[in-house]
Amino acid sequence: MSIGVASDARGRRERRPLKQLFLIAFAVLLSGCAGVQSALDPAGTEAEAVATLFWVMVAGGTLIWIAVMGGFYYATRIKREPHSERAAGRLILWGGAVFPVVVLTLLLAYGLSLMPKLRPWTAVAEEPALRIEVTGEQFWWRVTYHRAGEDPVVAANEIRLPVGERVVFTLKSADVVHSFWIPSLGGKMDMIPGRDNTLTLEATRTGIYRSPCAEFCGSSHALMVFSTVVMEPDAFDDWLAREARPSPGAKADGLDAFLRNGCQACHAITGTEANGVIGPDLSHVGSRDTLGAGILQNEIDSYVALIRRPDVIKPGIRMPGFHGLPDEEIETIARYLKGLE
Amino acid sequence: MHIRWKHVAIALAILPFAAVFAVWTGLFNVGAASGHWKITDWFLHFAMQSSVRTYALPVEVPEPLPREGLAAAAGHFETGCAVCHSSPDVPRDAWARQMLPEPPALSDVLASDKWTDAELFRIVKHGVRFTGMPAWPTQDRDDEIWAMVAFLREMPDLDAKAYRDLAYGPSSANAVAPAVNDLETLVADCARCHGEDGMGRGDAVPVLAGQQRTYLEESLVAYAANRRESGVMTQAALDADADLFADLAAYYADLPRADMETRTAPGAELVERGRAIAMEGLPDDDIPSCDSCHARLDRNPAYPAIDGQKHHYLQTQLELFAEEKRGGTSLAETMHEFSRHLKPEDIEALAAYYSTLEPQ
C-alpha cells in the first residue's frame, strides 16, 4: 500500500496519509536539532551565543521574507496599475538601500558584540586554571591536561571538562589540517600544522557530547571522532587525579604479552615501562567512552578487531595489523587493555 | 581469366581459415631436432637482441657492481644455470645442447663484449621468450640480480677450482645437490652459502648462527611459499624437504656464534645516529624505537635478532621493507609501516649501528 495517496472502497481520495508523511519527515528533521552533536541544543556558553545568533537571524529572515512576499502580493493582486516613477524611486531607495544597510549594520553590531564571548582572547592572557592541549593526528586526538601547578596528564580520544569552568584549549596538528568542534559547546576552530590556535569554552550542562573532525583530513576523516564528557567539578578533579596515577590494572597479566610483541614502541601506559609516544596513550583506555577515536564500542571484541586488522576498521591508519599473532595472544592483550580503567 | 578485385578480396577472406586448417593438419613440424630455418633463426635473434638492447636503456647500473653476494650468486648459478650454460667446472649437459635455440656456453659469450651489464641484468631478470630462458623467480630483488651480473663478469676469469670454491665453499668442494633429503645433507647444502659455522659467506648472506628458531622456521616456510621474495632462497627452500624446516631452524639457532671474518667499522657519527633511532625512534616521523621489539630478551620469537647482523644485509632488508618488497614471517608486514618513513640516511645509520653491536 502506498503511503502518499490512498483510495477507499468508493474511490474517494483520502489525503491523510500524505499529511502523516510530512509530519514524520518534519519530526525526523527536527530530531537533528537535539542530541549529542547539535549546535541548536547548547550545553555551553559559546554554543548558547551561537544558537541565539542563529534564532535572531531566523526570526529576522522570516520577517523580511514575509514583507517581500507581501509587497509581491500587493503589486500583483491589489494594485495592478503602473506605479509612478517617483514612487518606484522611493521604494528602491528605502527598500533596496537604506533598509538593508540598517539591518546588516545592526546584525554586524550584534554579531561583533558576541565575539568576546566566542573568542575571549583576553581570558587567555594569564595561564588559566585548566588548559587542554589537543593535537589532531591522522586519525585520532592526542589530549594533554595542564592544571596550573601540576604535572601534565596525557590521554587520547576523549576530553573531560568540569561544568561551569572556563577551559582554554590549545589546538595543534601533527600532520594535516583538522578541525576541532564540539557542536554542543561552541564553534569550530581549525587545527593547523605548525601553529597553535587558542579556543576557550565553558560547559553549562553535564553530559556526553560527540565531536567529529570538521575538516577533511584523509581517508578516515569520517572515522575521527572524540567524546566530550562534561562532569561536576568535584567528579572531574577526582577523575583527573585518577588519570594521572597508574591504572590498578596496569601490572595485570597481559602486560607481558603487550610488551613482548612490541606495542610499547608506539603506546604508553603509566606505571609500566611502556612509554611510546607515536600512538594514543593507553593508560586508562578501558574506561573511555568509545574505542578507536569514537567509532567502536569499548569492549573486548573491539580491541581484538583493532589489533588484528586496524586498516580494515580505519583505512589509512598508521598502526600495522597484528593478524600474524595467535588469537589467544591478541585476546590476552585485548583483555589487559580493557582492564586499564 | 582476368584477376579482379573481387577475387583478391575472396582470397584474403579465405586465407586465415586456410592457415588455421594447415596448422590443424599438424603437418608443421615443431620438433626441436631439425632446428630452425636459417632465416627464422636470424629473425628470432634479431628480435631478441633488439628487444634486450632497447629495454636495457633505462636500467641504472650500480658502479661498481656489488660483490657482497658473489658467493650466493655463484651457488645459485651452479644450482640453476650451469646445466644449460656450462661453468668453468663442468660442460653443458648433453640434453641442454639439444634445446632450441641451443643455450650458449656462457664463458665464451661473456669473454666477449656481446652484452653490456645493463643488458645482462635485463636478460637475467626478465628471461627470454621462446628460448627456455626463465625469468628470475621474483621481480622484487634487483640486488640479487646485480649480484648475479657481478658473478657473470667474474666467471670468465675463474678456473674450475676457483669456481668450485666460490659456489660450494672452500671446505665442501665437489658436494652435489642433495639426492637424499636428510638433515645432514641439507645442512651441507645450506653451508654452501651460509657457511658451516652459520656466519654466511659474503656480506649479502646473513648470520644465522644463534638466530631465533621460530623466525628461521617461519622464514623458510615463507621462502618456499614465495611470501618472502628471493630467487636464491625460494629455490633452496623448495629443494629442501619442508618436514625438515623445524630441525634446520633449530640447528642454526643452536649454532654458537663465531667472530665475524671481516668487519670494517662504520663511522662513529653514523653509529651514534643509528643508536639514537634504535633506542628512541623518530617520533616526529612516526618511527618507533627498533629496540622495543628487537632488543627484548623475552620478545616474540618471530622477531629476529639483528644485533651483530651484517651491515650490508641489514641495509638491503630495510630498503626492501621500505619498498614493501619484503615479506617473511606472519608479522613481517608490520615492518612496512615503520620503514616506509625511514630516509636512506636513517637506514644506513641503523644498519651501521646494529652491525656494530655485540650479540646478546
Image (tube, rainbow, N blue to C red):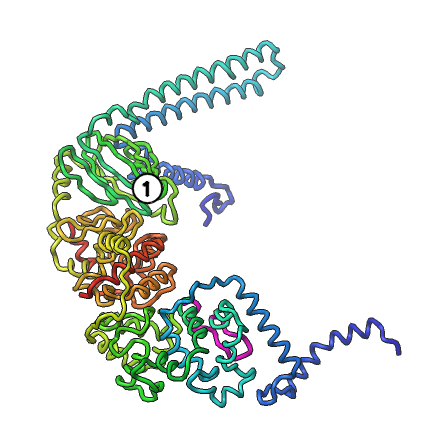
Q: Check disc 1 and report the residue beneath it.
A: A212
Q: Is residue B38 above or below residue A148?
A: below
Residue drawn at the location 24% of the way across and 45% of the way down? A156
In the rendered image, is residue A31 in sight? Answer: no
Q: What secondary structure prevails in the magenta region?
A: loop
Horizontal side of residue B332 vs B155, given as left or right: left
Above or below B148: residue B32 = below
Q: In the depicted view, which residue is nearer to us: B244 or A64? A: B244
- State whether residue B10 appears in this view: yes
| Residue A113 lies within the magenta run | no
| Residue shown at the point (35%, 61%) measured from the top left | B321
Residue A13's x, y, as percent? 50, 41
In this picture, residue B20 sits left or right of residue B295: right
- For the residue pair B24 and A211, the one nearer the viewer reads as B24
Name of the residue lying farthest toward the top: A86
Q: How many marks?
A: 1
Q: Residue at coordinates 43% horizontally, 63% vertically from top-left?
A: B63
Q: Nearer the viewer, residue B347 or B219?
A: B347
Using residue B196 as the reference point, say whether residue B34 is left or right of it.
Answer: right
Tell me which chain the residue with mark 1 is part of. A
Rendering quarter of residue A325: bottom left
Q: Position of residue A50 (x, y in %)?
A: 33, 28
- Measured along the vertical axis of the image, is residue B122 above or below residue B235? above
Residue for point 80% across, 74% down: B8
Q: Quadrant of residue A56?
A: top left
Of the pair A73 and A142, the residue shown nearer to us? A142
Residue reaching furthest to the right: B1
Instruction: Tell me where residue B267 appears, x and y as whole percent.
Output: 28, 56
Three-letter code for the amino acid on which mark 1 is drawn:
Pro
The magenta segment is B125-141
How many residues crowd mark 1 within 10 Å: few (<14), some (14–19), many (20+)? many
